[in-house]
Image (spheres, rainbow, N blue to C red):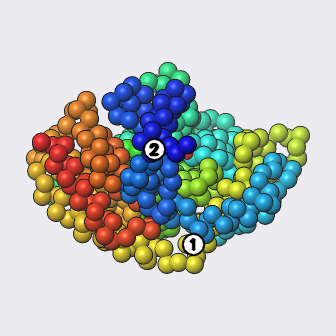
Amino acid sequence: MLNKPQTRTSSLIQRDLSALWHPCTQMKDHESYPIIPIRRGKGIWLEDFERNRYIDGISSWWVNLFGHSNPRINSRIKAQLDTLEHVLLAGFSHEPAIELAQRLVQITPSGLERCFYADNGSSAVEIAMKMSFHYWLNKGQAKKTKFITLSNGYHGETLGALSVGNVDLYKKTYGPLLIETITVPSPDCYNREAGESWKEYSIRQFEAMSQALEKHSSEVSAVIIEPLVQCAGNMRMYHPIYLTLLREACDNYGVHLIADEIAVGFGRTGTLFACEQADITPDFLCLSKGLTGGYLPLSAVLTHEYVYQAFYDDYENLTAFLHSHSYTGNPLGCSAALATLDIFTEDDVLGNNQKLATTMAQATAHFSEHPHVAEVRQHGMILAIEMVKDKQTKASFPWQERRGLKIYHHGLKNGVLLRPLGNVIYFMPPYVIKKSEIEHMARIAFEGIDLATL
Ligand SMILES: *Cc1c(COP(=O)(O)O)cnc(C)c1O
């Protein structure tokens, strides 16, 4: 018997709501807003069971780089599937994990020479934190137990990663469970004075970091930051000079620098890695999300040989890093990552992104004239629009009004998946989007802002 598309959708929704608990969702919302079962994806498009199509304007939570069902990534995974789907990575190894480690060492900032795998971003952050702490311990500096973080930062949802994050919406509830950190004000340039440049403001904000390092360095293991863009913190951005100053200061005070490029890595900000724009190498680099082109969960922490050597000793001395996840370095994930890196090598991805970034800027140039838009900001393939109640004072709409949700629904009705963060609308599309599709996305976003600010 043929299922009518309509029936199929409602039956899936019913089954979904009877058994599933969705991430980052107040499930009661789905009494008013139906969940959308997706039938398939192709390129930038997602298609539901009623043949509605949506531009994936946020790369399915920032993971997808080269579109859904990409033939080059598909075929590499299929070939790997018939060879080896998984094997433990302790005592054993496999070609995809080896090749990927070597290639990540090659393409990441120079000095990063060791690759430790995990299977999601939060775990990568926790690994970097544990490695940093453990490094100092192995070096006889047991007092270096703290982390310096930025206000408005985000590093994931597991308890350690949540501890070094600073977005209240996700963190506050779990406060009693978290480790204490030293938080300094973010260089977030949205807060700069009128007439002040991004660079001037970022330099000015560094003063607080400098003071925190001076005061606490003897007890601080590492500073952890998101280079250039605080993505989950409403796509707030800053100038690369902050990273240059931070690298210098971390060196002076004997503190590690952890760069969380889980969201901004792999070409998002214009360069392959955001750290390149400041010409710095962190002590630990966390990668995930785009690493597999948005196909499979995989993450990696890259670090230096000097860190590795601090753990390298006779077993009896108990200095080893005994951290593991069951799916560490999964061969299918590594193959997806290799195919993704191949695309970066074979195509002029960064050059093409430069054109797409210009198109995004042009398509949204007029947004800043909107009476409820305080700022349009951009770092490469991330463009964000700050919607405010009062343009002069930058007073924001109360969060309870959930105006972003109106834009989300307007987008869905018009074939675009936008998922505003509070009052910030942003574009973070796959790199295979076309000019006309960017223009459509911008048009719908502008209408959405109009509707949401009526
Ligand atoms: C998404 C994200 C994480 C967490 O990664 P998960 O795979 O969701 O655990 C950590 N840091 C940053 C900057 C992120 O954007």
Please give the name of the residue rendered at 51% of the width and 54% of the height, measured from the top-left corner: 40
Q: In the figure, is residue 91 to the left or right of 369?
A: right
Amino acid type at mark 2: Lys
In the rendered structure, are the residues bearing label 1 and label 2 in contact, judged by CB atoms less than 8 Å apart?
Answer: no
Please give the name of the residue rendered at 34% of the width and 34% of the height, measured from the top-left corner: 33
In the image, farthest residue toward the front: 1
Q: Quadrant of residue 203?
A: bottom left
How far across and how far down the image is residue 125, in percent?
58, 44
Secondary structure, mark 2, is loop
- Between 329 and 402, the one lying in front of the other is 402
| Quadrant, the N terminus | top right
Residue 343 — which label?
A: 1
The reply to whether the residue tagged 2 has its Cβ within 8 angstroms of ligand 1 is no
Q: In the figure, is residue 157 to the left or right of 200?
A: right
Say if residue 189 shows up in the picture.
Answer: no
Amino acid type at mark 1: Ile
Secondary structure, mark 1, is helix
Does 230 sit above or below residue 161? below
How far across and how far down the image is residue 433, in percent?
40, 67
How far across and how far down the image is residue 441, in percent?
30, 59
Residue 254 — which label?
A: none
Please give the name of the residue rendered at 68% of the width and 66% of the height, measured from the top-left corner: 76
How far across and how far down the image is residue 167, in percent?
40, 36
| Quadrant, the C terminus | top left
Q: In the figure, is residue 340 to the left or right of 360?
A: right
Does 31 sit above or below residue 199? above
The residues bearing labels 1 and 2 have C-alpha atoms spaced at a distance of: 39 Å
Does 376 sit above or below residue 216? below
Q: Which residue is mark 2?
A: 4
Say if residue 151 shows up in the picture.
Answer: yes
Please give the name of the residue rendered at 42% of the width and 42% of the height, measured from the top-left corner: 6
The reply to whether the residue tagged 1 has its Cβ within 8 angstroms of ligand 1 is no
